[in-house]
Image: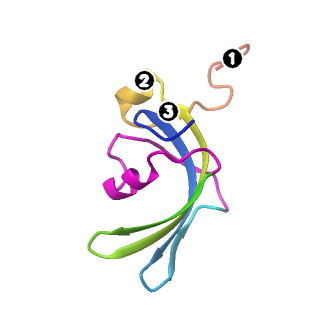
Amino acid sequence: MEITEKTVVSLRYIMKNKKGEELENTFSGPAVQYLHGSGKILPQLESLLTGLKTGDKKEITVEIPDTFHFDVRIDDIRMATPEEIQAGNPITIAENACGPGCCC
């Protein structure tokens, strides 16, 4: 599956400024999730992620008032549920939140 509008994307990234200083690194923690096409991340970044597939890695440079470099790895992509589309972001269900016998 590839990243398109209305997909939930799980990714990890390292973000650096134009001097190469590391500002954020999500590789040691859980993947970051977002709903593609919801406008919750930088539009330039979202555009450059479109079309990538699970397992893809990409170096991305985004220029907003400053320049930022991202080393991105796509962990997972899935279709968003109607509830996630309505909410504008992924919905996380806590383990065992539904009770015994739940299959969600």
- The answer to whether 68 is drawn above or below residue 3 in the figure is below
CB atoms at circles 1 and 3 under 8 Å apart?
no
Kind of residue indicated by mark 1: Cys
Residue found farthest to the right: 101
> SS class of the residue under badge 3?
loop
Q: Quadrant of the N terminus?
A: top right
Picture residue at 42% right of the left edge, 23% below the top = 83
**Is 46 within the magenta?**
yes
Q: Is residue 74 left or right of residue 50?
A: right
- The image's colour scheme reads rainbow
Q: Which mark is residue 83?
A: 2
Q: Which of 34/94 is in front?
A: 34
How far across and down, in percent of the image, does residue 87 sit?
A: 37, 31
Rounded to the nearest whole Å, what is the CA distance between mark 1 and mark 2? 17 Å
Q: Residues within 10 Å of mark 1 (few under 14, many from 20)?
A: few
Q: Disc 1 or 2, which lies upstream in sequence?
A: 2
CB atoms at circles 3 and 2 under 8 Å apart?
yes
Kind of residue indicated by mark 2: Glu
Kind of residue indicated by mark 3: Ile
The region drawn magenta spans 28-55
Q: Disc 1 or 3, which lies upstream in sequence?
A: 3
Among the 4 quarters of the image, the one containing residue 17: bottom left
Q: Which of 84/13 is in front?
A: 13
Q: Which residue is mark 1?
A: 103
How far across and down, in percent of the image, does residue 15 sit?
A: 49, 69
**Is 15 within the magenta?**
no
Picture residue at 44% right of the left edge, 47% below the top = 50
- Kindly report the secondary structure that dominates the magenta region of the rendered protein: loop
